[in-house]
Amino acid sequence: MKIAIIYNKDIQGVINTFGMQNKEFYNEVTVKRVAGSLEKAGHNVAVLDGNKQIIERLENFLPRVMEGEHMGMIFNMAYGIQGESRYTHIPSMLEMLGLPYVGSSPSGHALALDKVLTKIIWKNNQLPTPDFWVFNSAEEDLSTVKFPVIVKPKMESVSFGLRVVHNQADLKDAVGFIVKEFSQQALAEQFIRGREFCIGLLGNSPVETFPVLEIDLEGDPDAIQTVGDKKLRPRNKICPADISETLATRMQKLSIEAFKALNLRDFARVDIRLDENDQIYLLEINSMASLGESGSYPYAAKVAGYDYESLVNRMLDVAAVRYFASNIMKQLPGDERLHKISRPARLRSFLKARQQQTEQFLKKLVDVNTHVRNVEGVNLCGELINTELSQLGFRHEVFPQLEVGNILFFTNASVPRYDHLILIPVDNRVKLAGQEYFHTDEQYLEGTGIWENKGGIAIVVSALQSLRFIRQLRKTQLGILLITDSSLDGRYARMIIQQKAALADRIIAVGGSPRDGGLILTRSGSASYFMEFKLLQSKVPENISLTAYAFNKTLAAITDLSKNHPENLIAPFDIQFQSNIFKEYAYGSAGISVRYNTSEEMDAIGQKIRKIIAQQKRSKVYHVHFEGGAKRPAMLKTLANEEFYNEIVSIAKSIDVRVTRMHRWSSADICHIDREMPKIDGMGPIGEFLPSNNERILRHSLIERSLLLALVLLKQSPWQK
């Protein structure tokens, strides 16, 4: 299952800083530990910052569910950034977006976070809670308060602002501090001398209670646990607490009733005070009990029999069952999988651990200009790739090229026969002046060529590194062909591509994939033509107009050939026309790009184009030059491609990676390969073109596609050990 963990990191990611500011955050160590626990169980996990960009981030990682897909979930660890009822902000947004999540509803969080409302509801349900008073300012009448009282903010947690006071002067000071510091009402609650306990709750129907945990106050009935204690010198915890079974059962029963009275869900922690006469008082309930290493909730869970990984996954399970009932149980890992890490989980953990190195390698690739005629840049890119592959035991063969960079072939096979041939184009049409260098943010990686080719290079290297990590790389015989003239339709590489493909069982190309995770089963073929018109009889001024008219009419007639044939595309490019009635000259040129899906269609188009040109060549007013033809054949739909695709779909579903089938109008080097060879393109990262020469990819897709490629290369069940 896809799981997005949301927490708060960038608190500046808001339109304005306004209202109550959050003082409660998860540290990244805890967030990573939760992510690791979910990944260990085989889930596809992304960690997202819950600021104003969260909707776009969620849409990228958890796009609209398509037919047959499993809906992902949110593991909410976001305490909110600012404003009132901050626990409710992310859940409210998730409700609007239609995304299921772990934890209580917005209304449940709002009630639990508001200590005054909590106590009113508990009292109405005959649940024991200390008497209380609420103040808006220190200038209000404080005379009705019965001391001692503990003063706290009305809507904060983790013991922020706690102070025990015994007289009106100290109370006035404490109320003033709370109102000013936290911009909210101050709650004065009858202080209960005695012992302090907490009860962890997990589940919905039924609600499970953890063993009663006591906060060790070292025998001091007047002691409390402040936020400083929790952060700097946590008090010892005693679990199970040293109390009678009857008292423990009573505490657990009251905690469940308190949980249900506020209509909370999935998990929570109830804080309790026991007076010197063994009377129980419910203090408050935390609807987002901390999962921090020193927290009471995971401590008690461990005594209940949950190690950290099983606790986190159990929290996910109870929420998933609440949303999806029994249908989800077949998708959730059992406890046995937590102790027997699957192959995808090991691979994913390795890929995530190396993500920074992968991005650094990708930056080096992107920052090298690889325009097809930039031989130095293309060869430098080849050297970077060679450095990585040679460390993985690949040897290489060089096919020298003078006009473009050297074509390189890598293999780890002991004989010239390959399970897979991987095609990697490295060149592009962007000259140095238009180069966009590597740029990154939390969601995207950007730069020239990063989607169409260089992201695919990084994915291939990462996939191979992960296979070496699990000691499986030598079990798959691979060929990797680095193509340096893809922008020229594989003019020099075509014969090499065909020669190497004939020795492989299957072909994989790592071009970029669109937002829906499309894998390319078919591609259009390409043809290109060049047309020139030049005025011959310059002494007749009206011939200038005739030449211009003929040039544009011919171009329009050729373009119109695709009007009633949507399966073919004809588009002019680099159109130029120059004329001068005083100097009496006229000249026009244009390129014509054709995309077609069968050779028969191309033959028909070619004949029609040449017929149109032949009519113009009879003119005595202007001279016509025309050249060109087919550059690459179409990659056609075949049973072999379909079977290969279905195999990949099966693997992708097991690791919660979205793939769909697609046709690309653009041609590519894979089109040069024999029709009946099993082949798939689009195994590169998910992304898109941007304005100018820039491209971008989704950052998390580097890991997803590397994992998918690694499992495809193994040609084995993804859950096989």
Image (tube, rainbow, N blue to C red):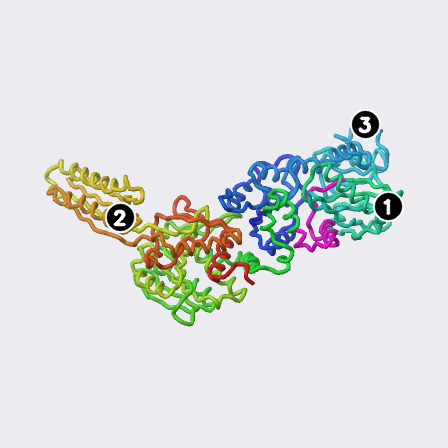
Name the outermost residue toward the top: 141
The residues bearing labels 3 and 2 have C-alpha atoms spaced at a distance of: 90 Å
Which of the two labelled residues, at mark 3 and mark 2, occupies the earlier sequence position? Answer: 3
Q: Position of residue 481 (x, y in %)?
A: 38, 62
The answer to whether residue 366 of the structure is visible from this angle is no
Tags 1 and 3 touching, CB below 8 Å: no
The part of the chain drawn in magenta is: 284-312
Secondary element type, mark 2: helix
At horizontal 54% and vertical 44% (from top left) the residue drawn is 58
Q: Which mark is residue 221?
A: 1
Q: Is residue 576 above or below residue 378?
A: above
Q: Which residue is mark 2?
A: 601
Secondary element type, mark 1: loop
Q: Amino acid at mark 3?
A: Asp
Q: Tell me which corner region of the image, top left, top right, bottom left or bottom right, holds residue 585.
A: top left
Relative placement, left or right, of 621 versus 635 is left
The residues bearing labels 1 and 3 have C-alpha atoms spaced at a distance of: 29 Å
The residues bearing labels 2 and 1 have C-alpha atoms spaced at a distance of: 90 Å
Q: Which residue is mark 3?
A: 141
